[in-house]
């Protein structure tokens, strides 16, 4: 699949879309080609701010992202939105409706919206989202927004690939505060209470105080103190202040080296994860393993051997010494 790299680096959306399709392909020859392309483009990456946005269904993620993206366009920024749709565990299909939910943003020549199916990847975050971010950076996008489906492990997965992680909340200080996972609060660089308008303004203020207290108890040992803000994406209220907060974060993180250290750590962790996936693939493709695996599965099920010993036999097949 021929990719015009010069067109991509000049911000051509068709070349970018074609490159993302190549990265997402499961064909072996396409995977090799995609990695060569990424290696070629690496010197042109890393200049954006990568922002993860999550929140429970109904919190208004798409409305917020469109309002936020449109504001960034007025500031002269080019915006890429990578929205991961959950794939059906039965049929395998995805709705991929983010462009219809962000109609105004999708019309702009300086915005790029790419909905991708999760295809069963952990937590609903598309397996190739990391590579797609690099392609968008090479194409000159200043802000990369990664929207997760907001369920299960997706928050942890997206936090491991972005610079700034934002959790959108509803103006409800009761059940939601009790139900939110402590781990997600610890990951958040900011909690933003959306839909703070109309009759919900007072409730949003109360909710903000609750979350500020919760974050105070879970203060992170970093240069950054997680912020709690409120906004109304529907009415475009306080969007500017949220961007100001994120811009301040990037300036401080760049000055003290925290941003580069975070990205380097994420790249190392990414390599470890890929190593595990590649080893698993090699095991599955090994003909001896294919023959022995059903037998060992049955022995473990029947209690005739331990899982450890069964796993060791399979690993020894993969790494047996050369004759």
Image (cartoon, helix red, strand yellow):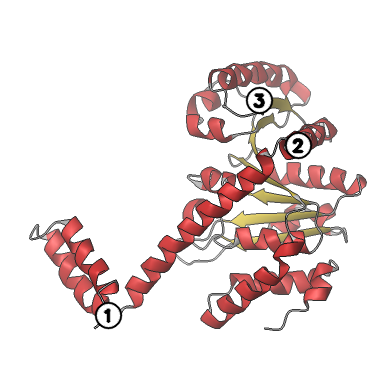
- Element class at badge 2: helix
Q: Nearer the viewer, mark 2 or mark 3?
A: 2
Above/below status of 94 relative to 211: below
First of labels 2, 1 by sequence position:
2
Q: CA distance from mark 3 to mark 1?
A: 54 Å
Q: Is residue 52 left or right of residue 285?
A: right
Mark 3 lies on residue: 225
First of labels 2, 3 by sequence position:
3
- Element class at badge 1: loop
Q: Are marks 3 and 1 in contact (CB under 8 Å)?
A: no
Mark 1 lies on residue: 322
- Please tell me how crowded label 3 is: few (under 14), some (14-19), or many (20+) other residues with Cα within 10 Å: some
Q: Residue at x 79, y 33 (%)?
A: 248
Residue 255's tag is: 2
Q: x, y percentage for residue 250? A: 75, 39
Where, quadrant-wise, is the N terminus in this rendering? bottom right
Q: x, y percentage for residue 125? A: 55, 54
Q: Are marks 2 and 3 in contact (CB under 8 Å)?
A: no
Front one among 100 and 243:
243
In the figure, residue 288 lies in which quadrant?
bottom left
In the figure, residue 15 lies in which quadrant?
bottom right
Is residue 322 at least partly visible in the picture? Answer: yes
First of labels 3, 1 by sequence position:
3
Q: CA distance from mark 2 to mark 3?
A: 16 Å
């Amino acid at each position: 699949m021929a990719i015009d790299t010069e067109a991509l680096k000049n911000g051509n959306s068709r070349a970018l879309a074609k490159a993302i399709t190549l990265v997402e392909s499961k064909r072996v020859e396409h995977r090799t080609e995609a990695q060569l392309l990424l290696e070629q483009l690496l010197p042109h990456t890393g200049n954006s701010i990568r922002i993860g946005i999550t929140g429970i269904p109904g919190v208004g993620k798409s409305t917020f992202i469109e309002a936020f993206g449109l504001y960034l366009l007025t500031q002269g920024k080019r915006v890429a939105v990578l929205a991961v749709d959950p794939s059906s565990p039965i049929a395998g299909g995805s709705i991929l409706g983010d462009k219809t939910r962000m109609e105004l943003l999708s019309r702009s020549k300086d915005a790029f919206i790419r909905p991708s199916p999760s295809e069963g990847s952990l937590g609903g975050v598309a397996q190739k989202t990391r590579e797609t971010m690099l392609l968008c950076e090479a194409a000159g996008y200043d802000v990369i927004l990664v929207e997760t489906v907001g369920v299960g492990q997706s928050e942890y997965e997206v936090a491991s690939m972005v610079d700034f992680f934002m959790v959108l909340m509803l103006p409800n200080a009761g059940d939601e505060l009790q139900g939110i996972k402590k781990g997600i609060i610890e990951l958040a660089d900011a909690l933003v209470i959306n839909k703070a308008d109309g009759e919900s303004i007072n409730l949003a203020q109360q909710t903000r105080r609750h979350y500020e207290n919760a974050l105070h108890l879970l203060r992170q040992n970093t240069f950054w103190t997680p912020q709690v803000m409120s906004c109304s994406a529907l009415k475009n209220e306080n969007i500017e202040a949220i961007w100001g907060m994120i811009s301040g974060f990037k300036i401080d993180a760049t000055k003290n080296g925290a941003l580069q250290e975070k990205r380097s750590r994420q790249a190392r962790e990414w390599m470890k994860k890929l190593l595990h996936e590649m080893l698993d693939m090699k095991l599955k493709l090994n003909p001896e393993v294919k023959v022995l695996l059903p037998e060992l599965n049955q022995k473990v099920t029947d209690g005739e051997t331990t899982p450890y010993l069964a796993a060791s036999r399979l690993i020894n097949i993969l790494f047996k010494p050369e004759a």
